Image (cartoon, rainbow, N blue to C red):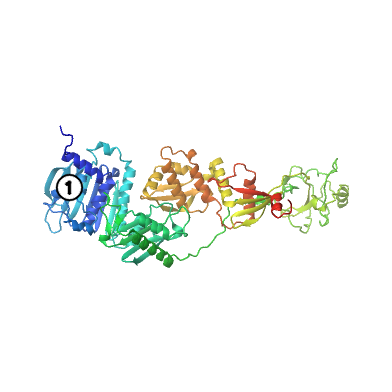
Amino acid sequence: MSEIRVLSKEVSELIAAGEVIDRPASVVKELLENAVDAGANVITVEIKNGGRTYLRVTDNGKGISAEDLPTAFLRHATSKITDKNDLEKILTLGFRGEALASICAVARVSVLTKRVGDDLGTHYEIEGGEEKVNEQSGCPDGTTFVVRDLFYNVPARLKFLKKDTTEGNYVAEIVTKLTLSHPEISFKFIRDNKVELLSAGDGKTYSAVYSVFGREFASSLVPVDYTWKGVHIGGFTVRPLESKSNRKFQNFFVNSRYIKSLACSCALEDAYRNQIMVGKFPACVLYIDIAPDTVDVNVHPTKIQVRFSNESLMHEAVYFAVKDALLKNDKPNEIKFESKRNFTDKELYSVTQDPGVQMRFAQPEPAVKPQQPIQPAVPAQPQHYSYAAQTPSVTESVKSVPETHYTQSVSQPAAPVPPASPAPAAKPQSRLTVEEVNRIVSEIPLPKDEDDRKFKYIADQSFEKKIEQPVVVEDFEEKPRPVVIGELFRTFVVAQCGDEMILMDKHAAHERYIFEKIKDDKNQLDPQMLLEPVMVVLPYDEYDALSHNVEKVRELGFEIEPDVAPTIAVKGVPIILGDENPSEVISELAKNFIANKLDPQIELFDDLYHSLACKAAIKAHDKSSILELQALLDKVYDNDDIRYCPHGRPVMIKLSKREIEKQFRRIV
């Protein structure tokens, strides 16, 4: 018995359909290409449930005659090529004649079509490759395809479809590519009864880009118009400062067909070399006009990959076109820098504290009744006290101070000021005269080194009446503290601590400091609302990830609202981000949700905290004041948790005085 047999028509068509139709987006692509080839200038795409249960494509093209309609659903039936020579100069999007046959093999298809000039159109229905209805019907000029219950007869293929939202995003991406490739056509995309895209169809490339990607992306582009050895490159490319975090915004069109080309992508990135940051990628919308016989579009079932007869020529054309556009149009913008404070007033104020802890007596509130004055007592054991020799003479009396009113000084010693004139007041019950104060001071042993004097009269500026008051602080041994000497290359902080020199990477240190603050205190992620929402255009997969994790994103301090796909409206950002642009952070959050979609728990998302900390931290080459650098050094020096940044780079290194002296041969 023979083991080799010819498959039935039903099985062979299902196998063939699997090569062309694998999801609703494939159906939309084939139908849209037919509509464009039919000369339509208005096309509407509508889907429900991601296109799985309902999909409609309507155009105002030339239509199909009643006698040709049944033939159109046969395999390899087409009006676009007649012989093998036509394969060498293909200018239409479709040409194989497999699309309609593949679609009707796995779905229920209904068609309404009418040619211009005909009195009546045709209503045609076909299911699983079997004709059901073929009748005359009234309808407008053009063609409408309605596809229902995709893969109803192939349950194995149906179970591999993703969620409706994801499948709908694939459809939306196909529509956007066709919108960009044919700006002369007005496209309308409706998803679940909501209009998500409507292009002008005025033939202007910029209008199509604006409709698809929005104002912010369109305003970041520079025009491209260049011809190299018969290859014309037009369209737009992005300014280097506006580069993206992935390659999903790179759009190449060869003879109005969207393609993916490694040669074009490499040429684009070569043109931006040394102009964009590592890890960033340029974006573009480039149209390549080339002779049809120098490109083969029949190398992939979906026709999305092509082969050029001269890959090096294509690389050169794209490279020189983009390079020329950047040299001509990427002019430096005038930027106004604003002083940005990276620490709170409290953190900066604490930096000025004298290493020797000082205590001072505060002026009592007027409403508080004065208590018995405190008499300075001579200590039982000799202590080191002194007073400033240049201190002005003491006023007539020193007012008594309640014992409970004292604070620790956190400010630098004030410059000497003239003593305030004593205000007329009722005579206290008891007070010290000048002679008594001098007598008590003279009995305190003075140190030999006058630089160690710690007994001073300082001006308390906390009140309008500036009254000199004594400050007494005990001498004690204190651990040396790091002191900022300066900054190297606006990146590394140079400091001294005892007999050690410290070099600290200010960005790495601040990034890790913020990272630890966020982990320890989730209040650091409290949102601050923006006056106007920031509209962020994302790839469809990132939009999908964020729209399904709005509550999780809110726990990270972002208030977002999914807008018309693929746009996210950012209404609030974490306070810790300050005035940073949230676009890149939002994209990073989306990538982390995609990577952890099986278990999206906030506690596990250290990468999210890394992203927030990196964006909020001081950047290398930022202008930083000594106060800021000292505050940062004080925060991280004794913190054992801050030895490496979240990416693993060291925060600081130390070099001892002995090692430095050895390098200068002061010691051997």
Picture coordinates of residue 201, whole percent (x, y) = 28, 60
Q: Nearer the viewer, residue 510 or 398?
A: 510
Q: Could you say which quadrant of the image residue 378 lies in?
A: top right
Q: Nearer the viewer, residue 566 or 192?
A: 566
SS for callout 1: loop
> For this view, does 390 lie left or right of residue 306?
right
Picture coordinates of residue 104, whole percent (x, y) = 19, 44
Picture coordinates of residue 8, whole percent (x, y) = 16, 39
User: Measuring 20% from the left and 48% from the top, which residue is drawn there?
Assistant: 100
On screen, residue 267 above or below 473: below
> For this view, does 384 lie left or right of residue 409?
right
Q: Nearer the viewer, residue 219 or 119?
A: 219
> For this view, does 607 lie left or right of residue 414?
left
Q: Quadrant of the N terminus?
A: top left
Picture coordinates of residue 408, whole percent (x, y) = 72, 46
Task: Answer whether residue 81 is visible to the viewer in this image.
Answer: no
Q: What residue is shown with label 1?
A: 75
Name the kind of residue labelled 1 in the image.
Arg
Residue count near mark 1 (Cα–Cα under 10 Å), binned few <14, some 14–19, many ≥20: some
Image label count: 1
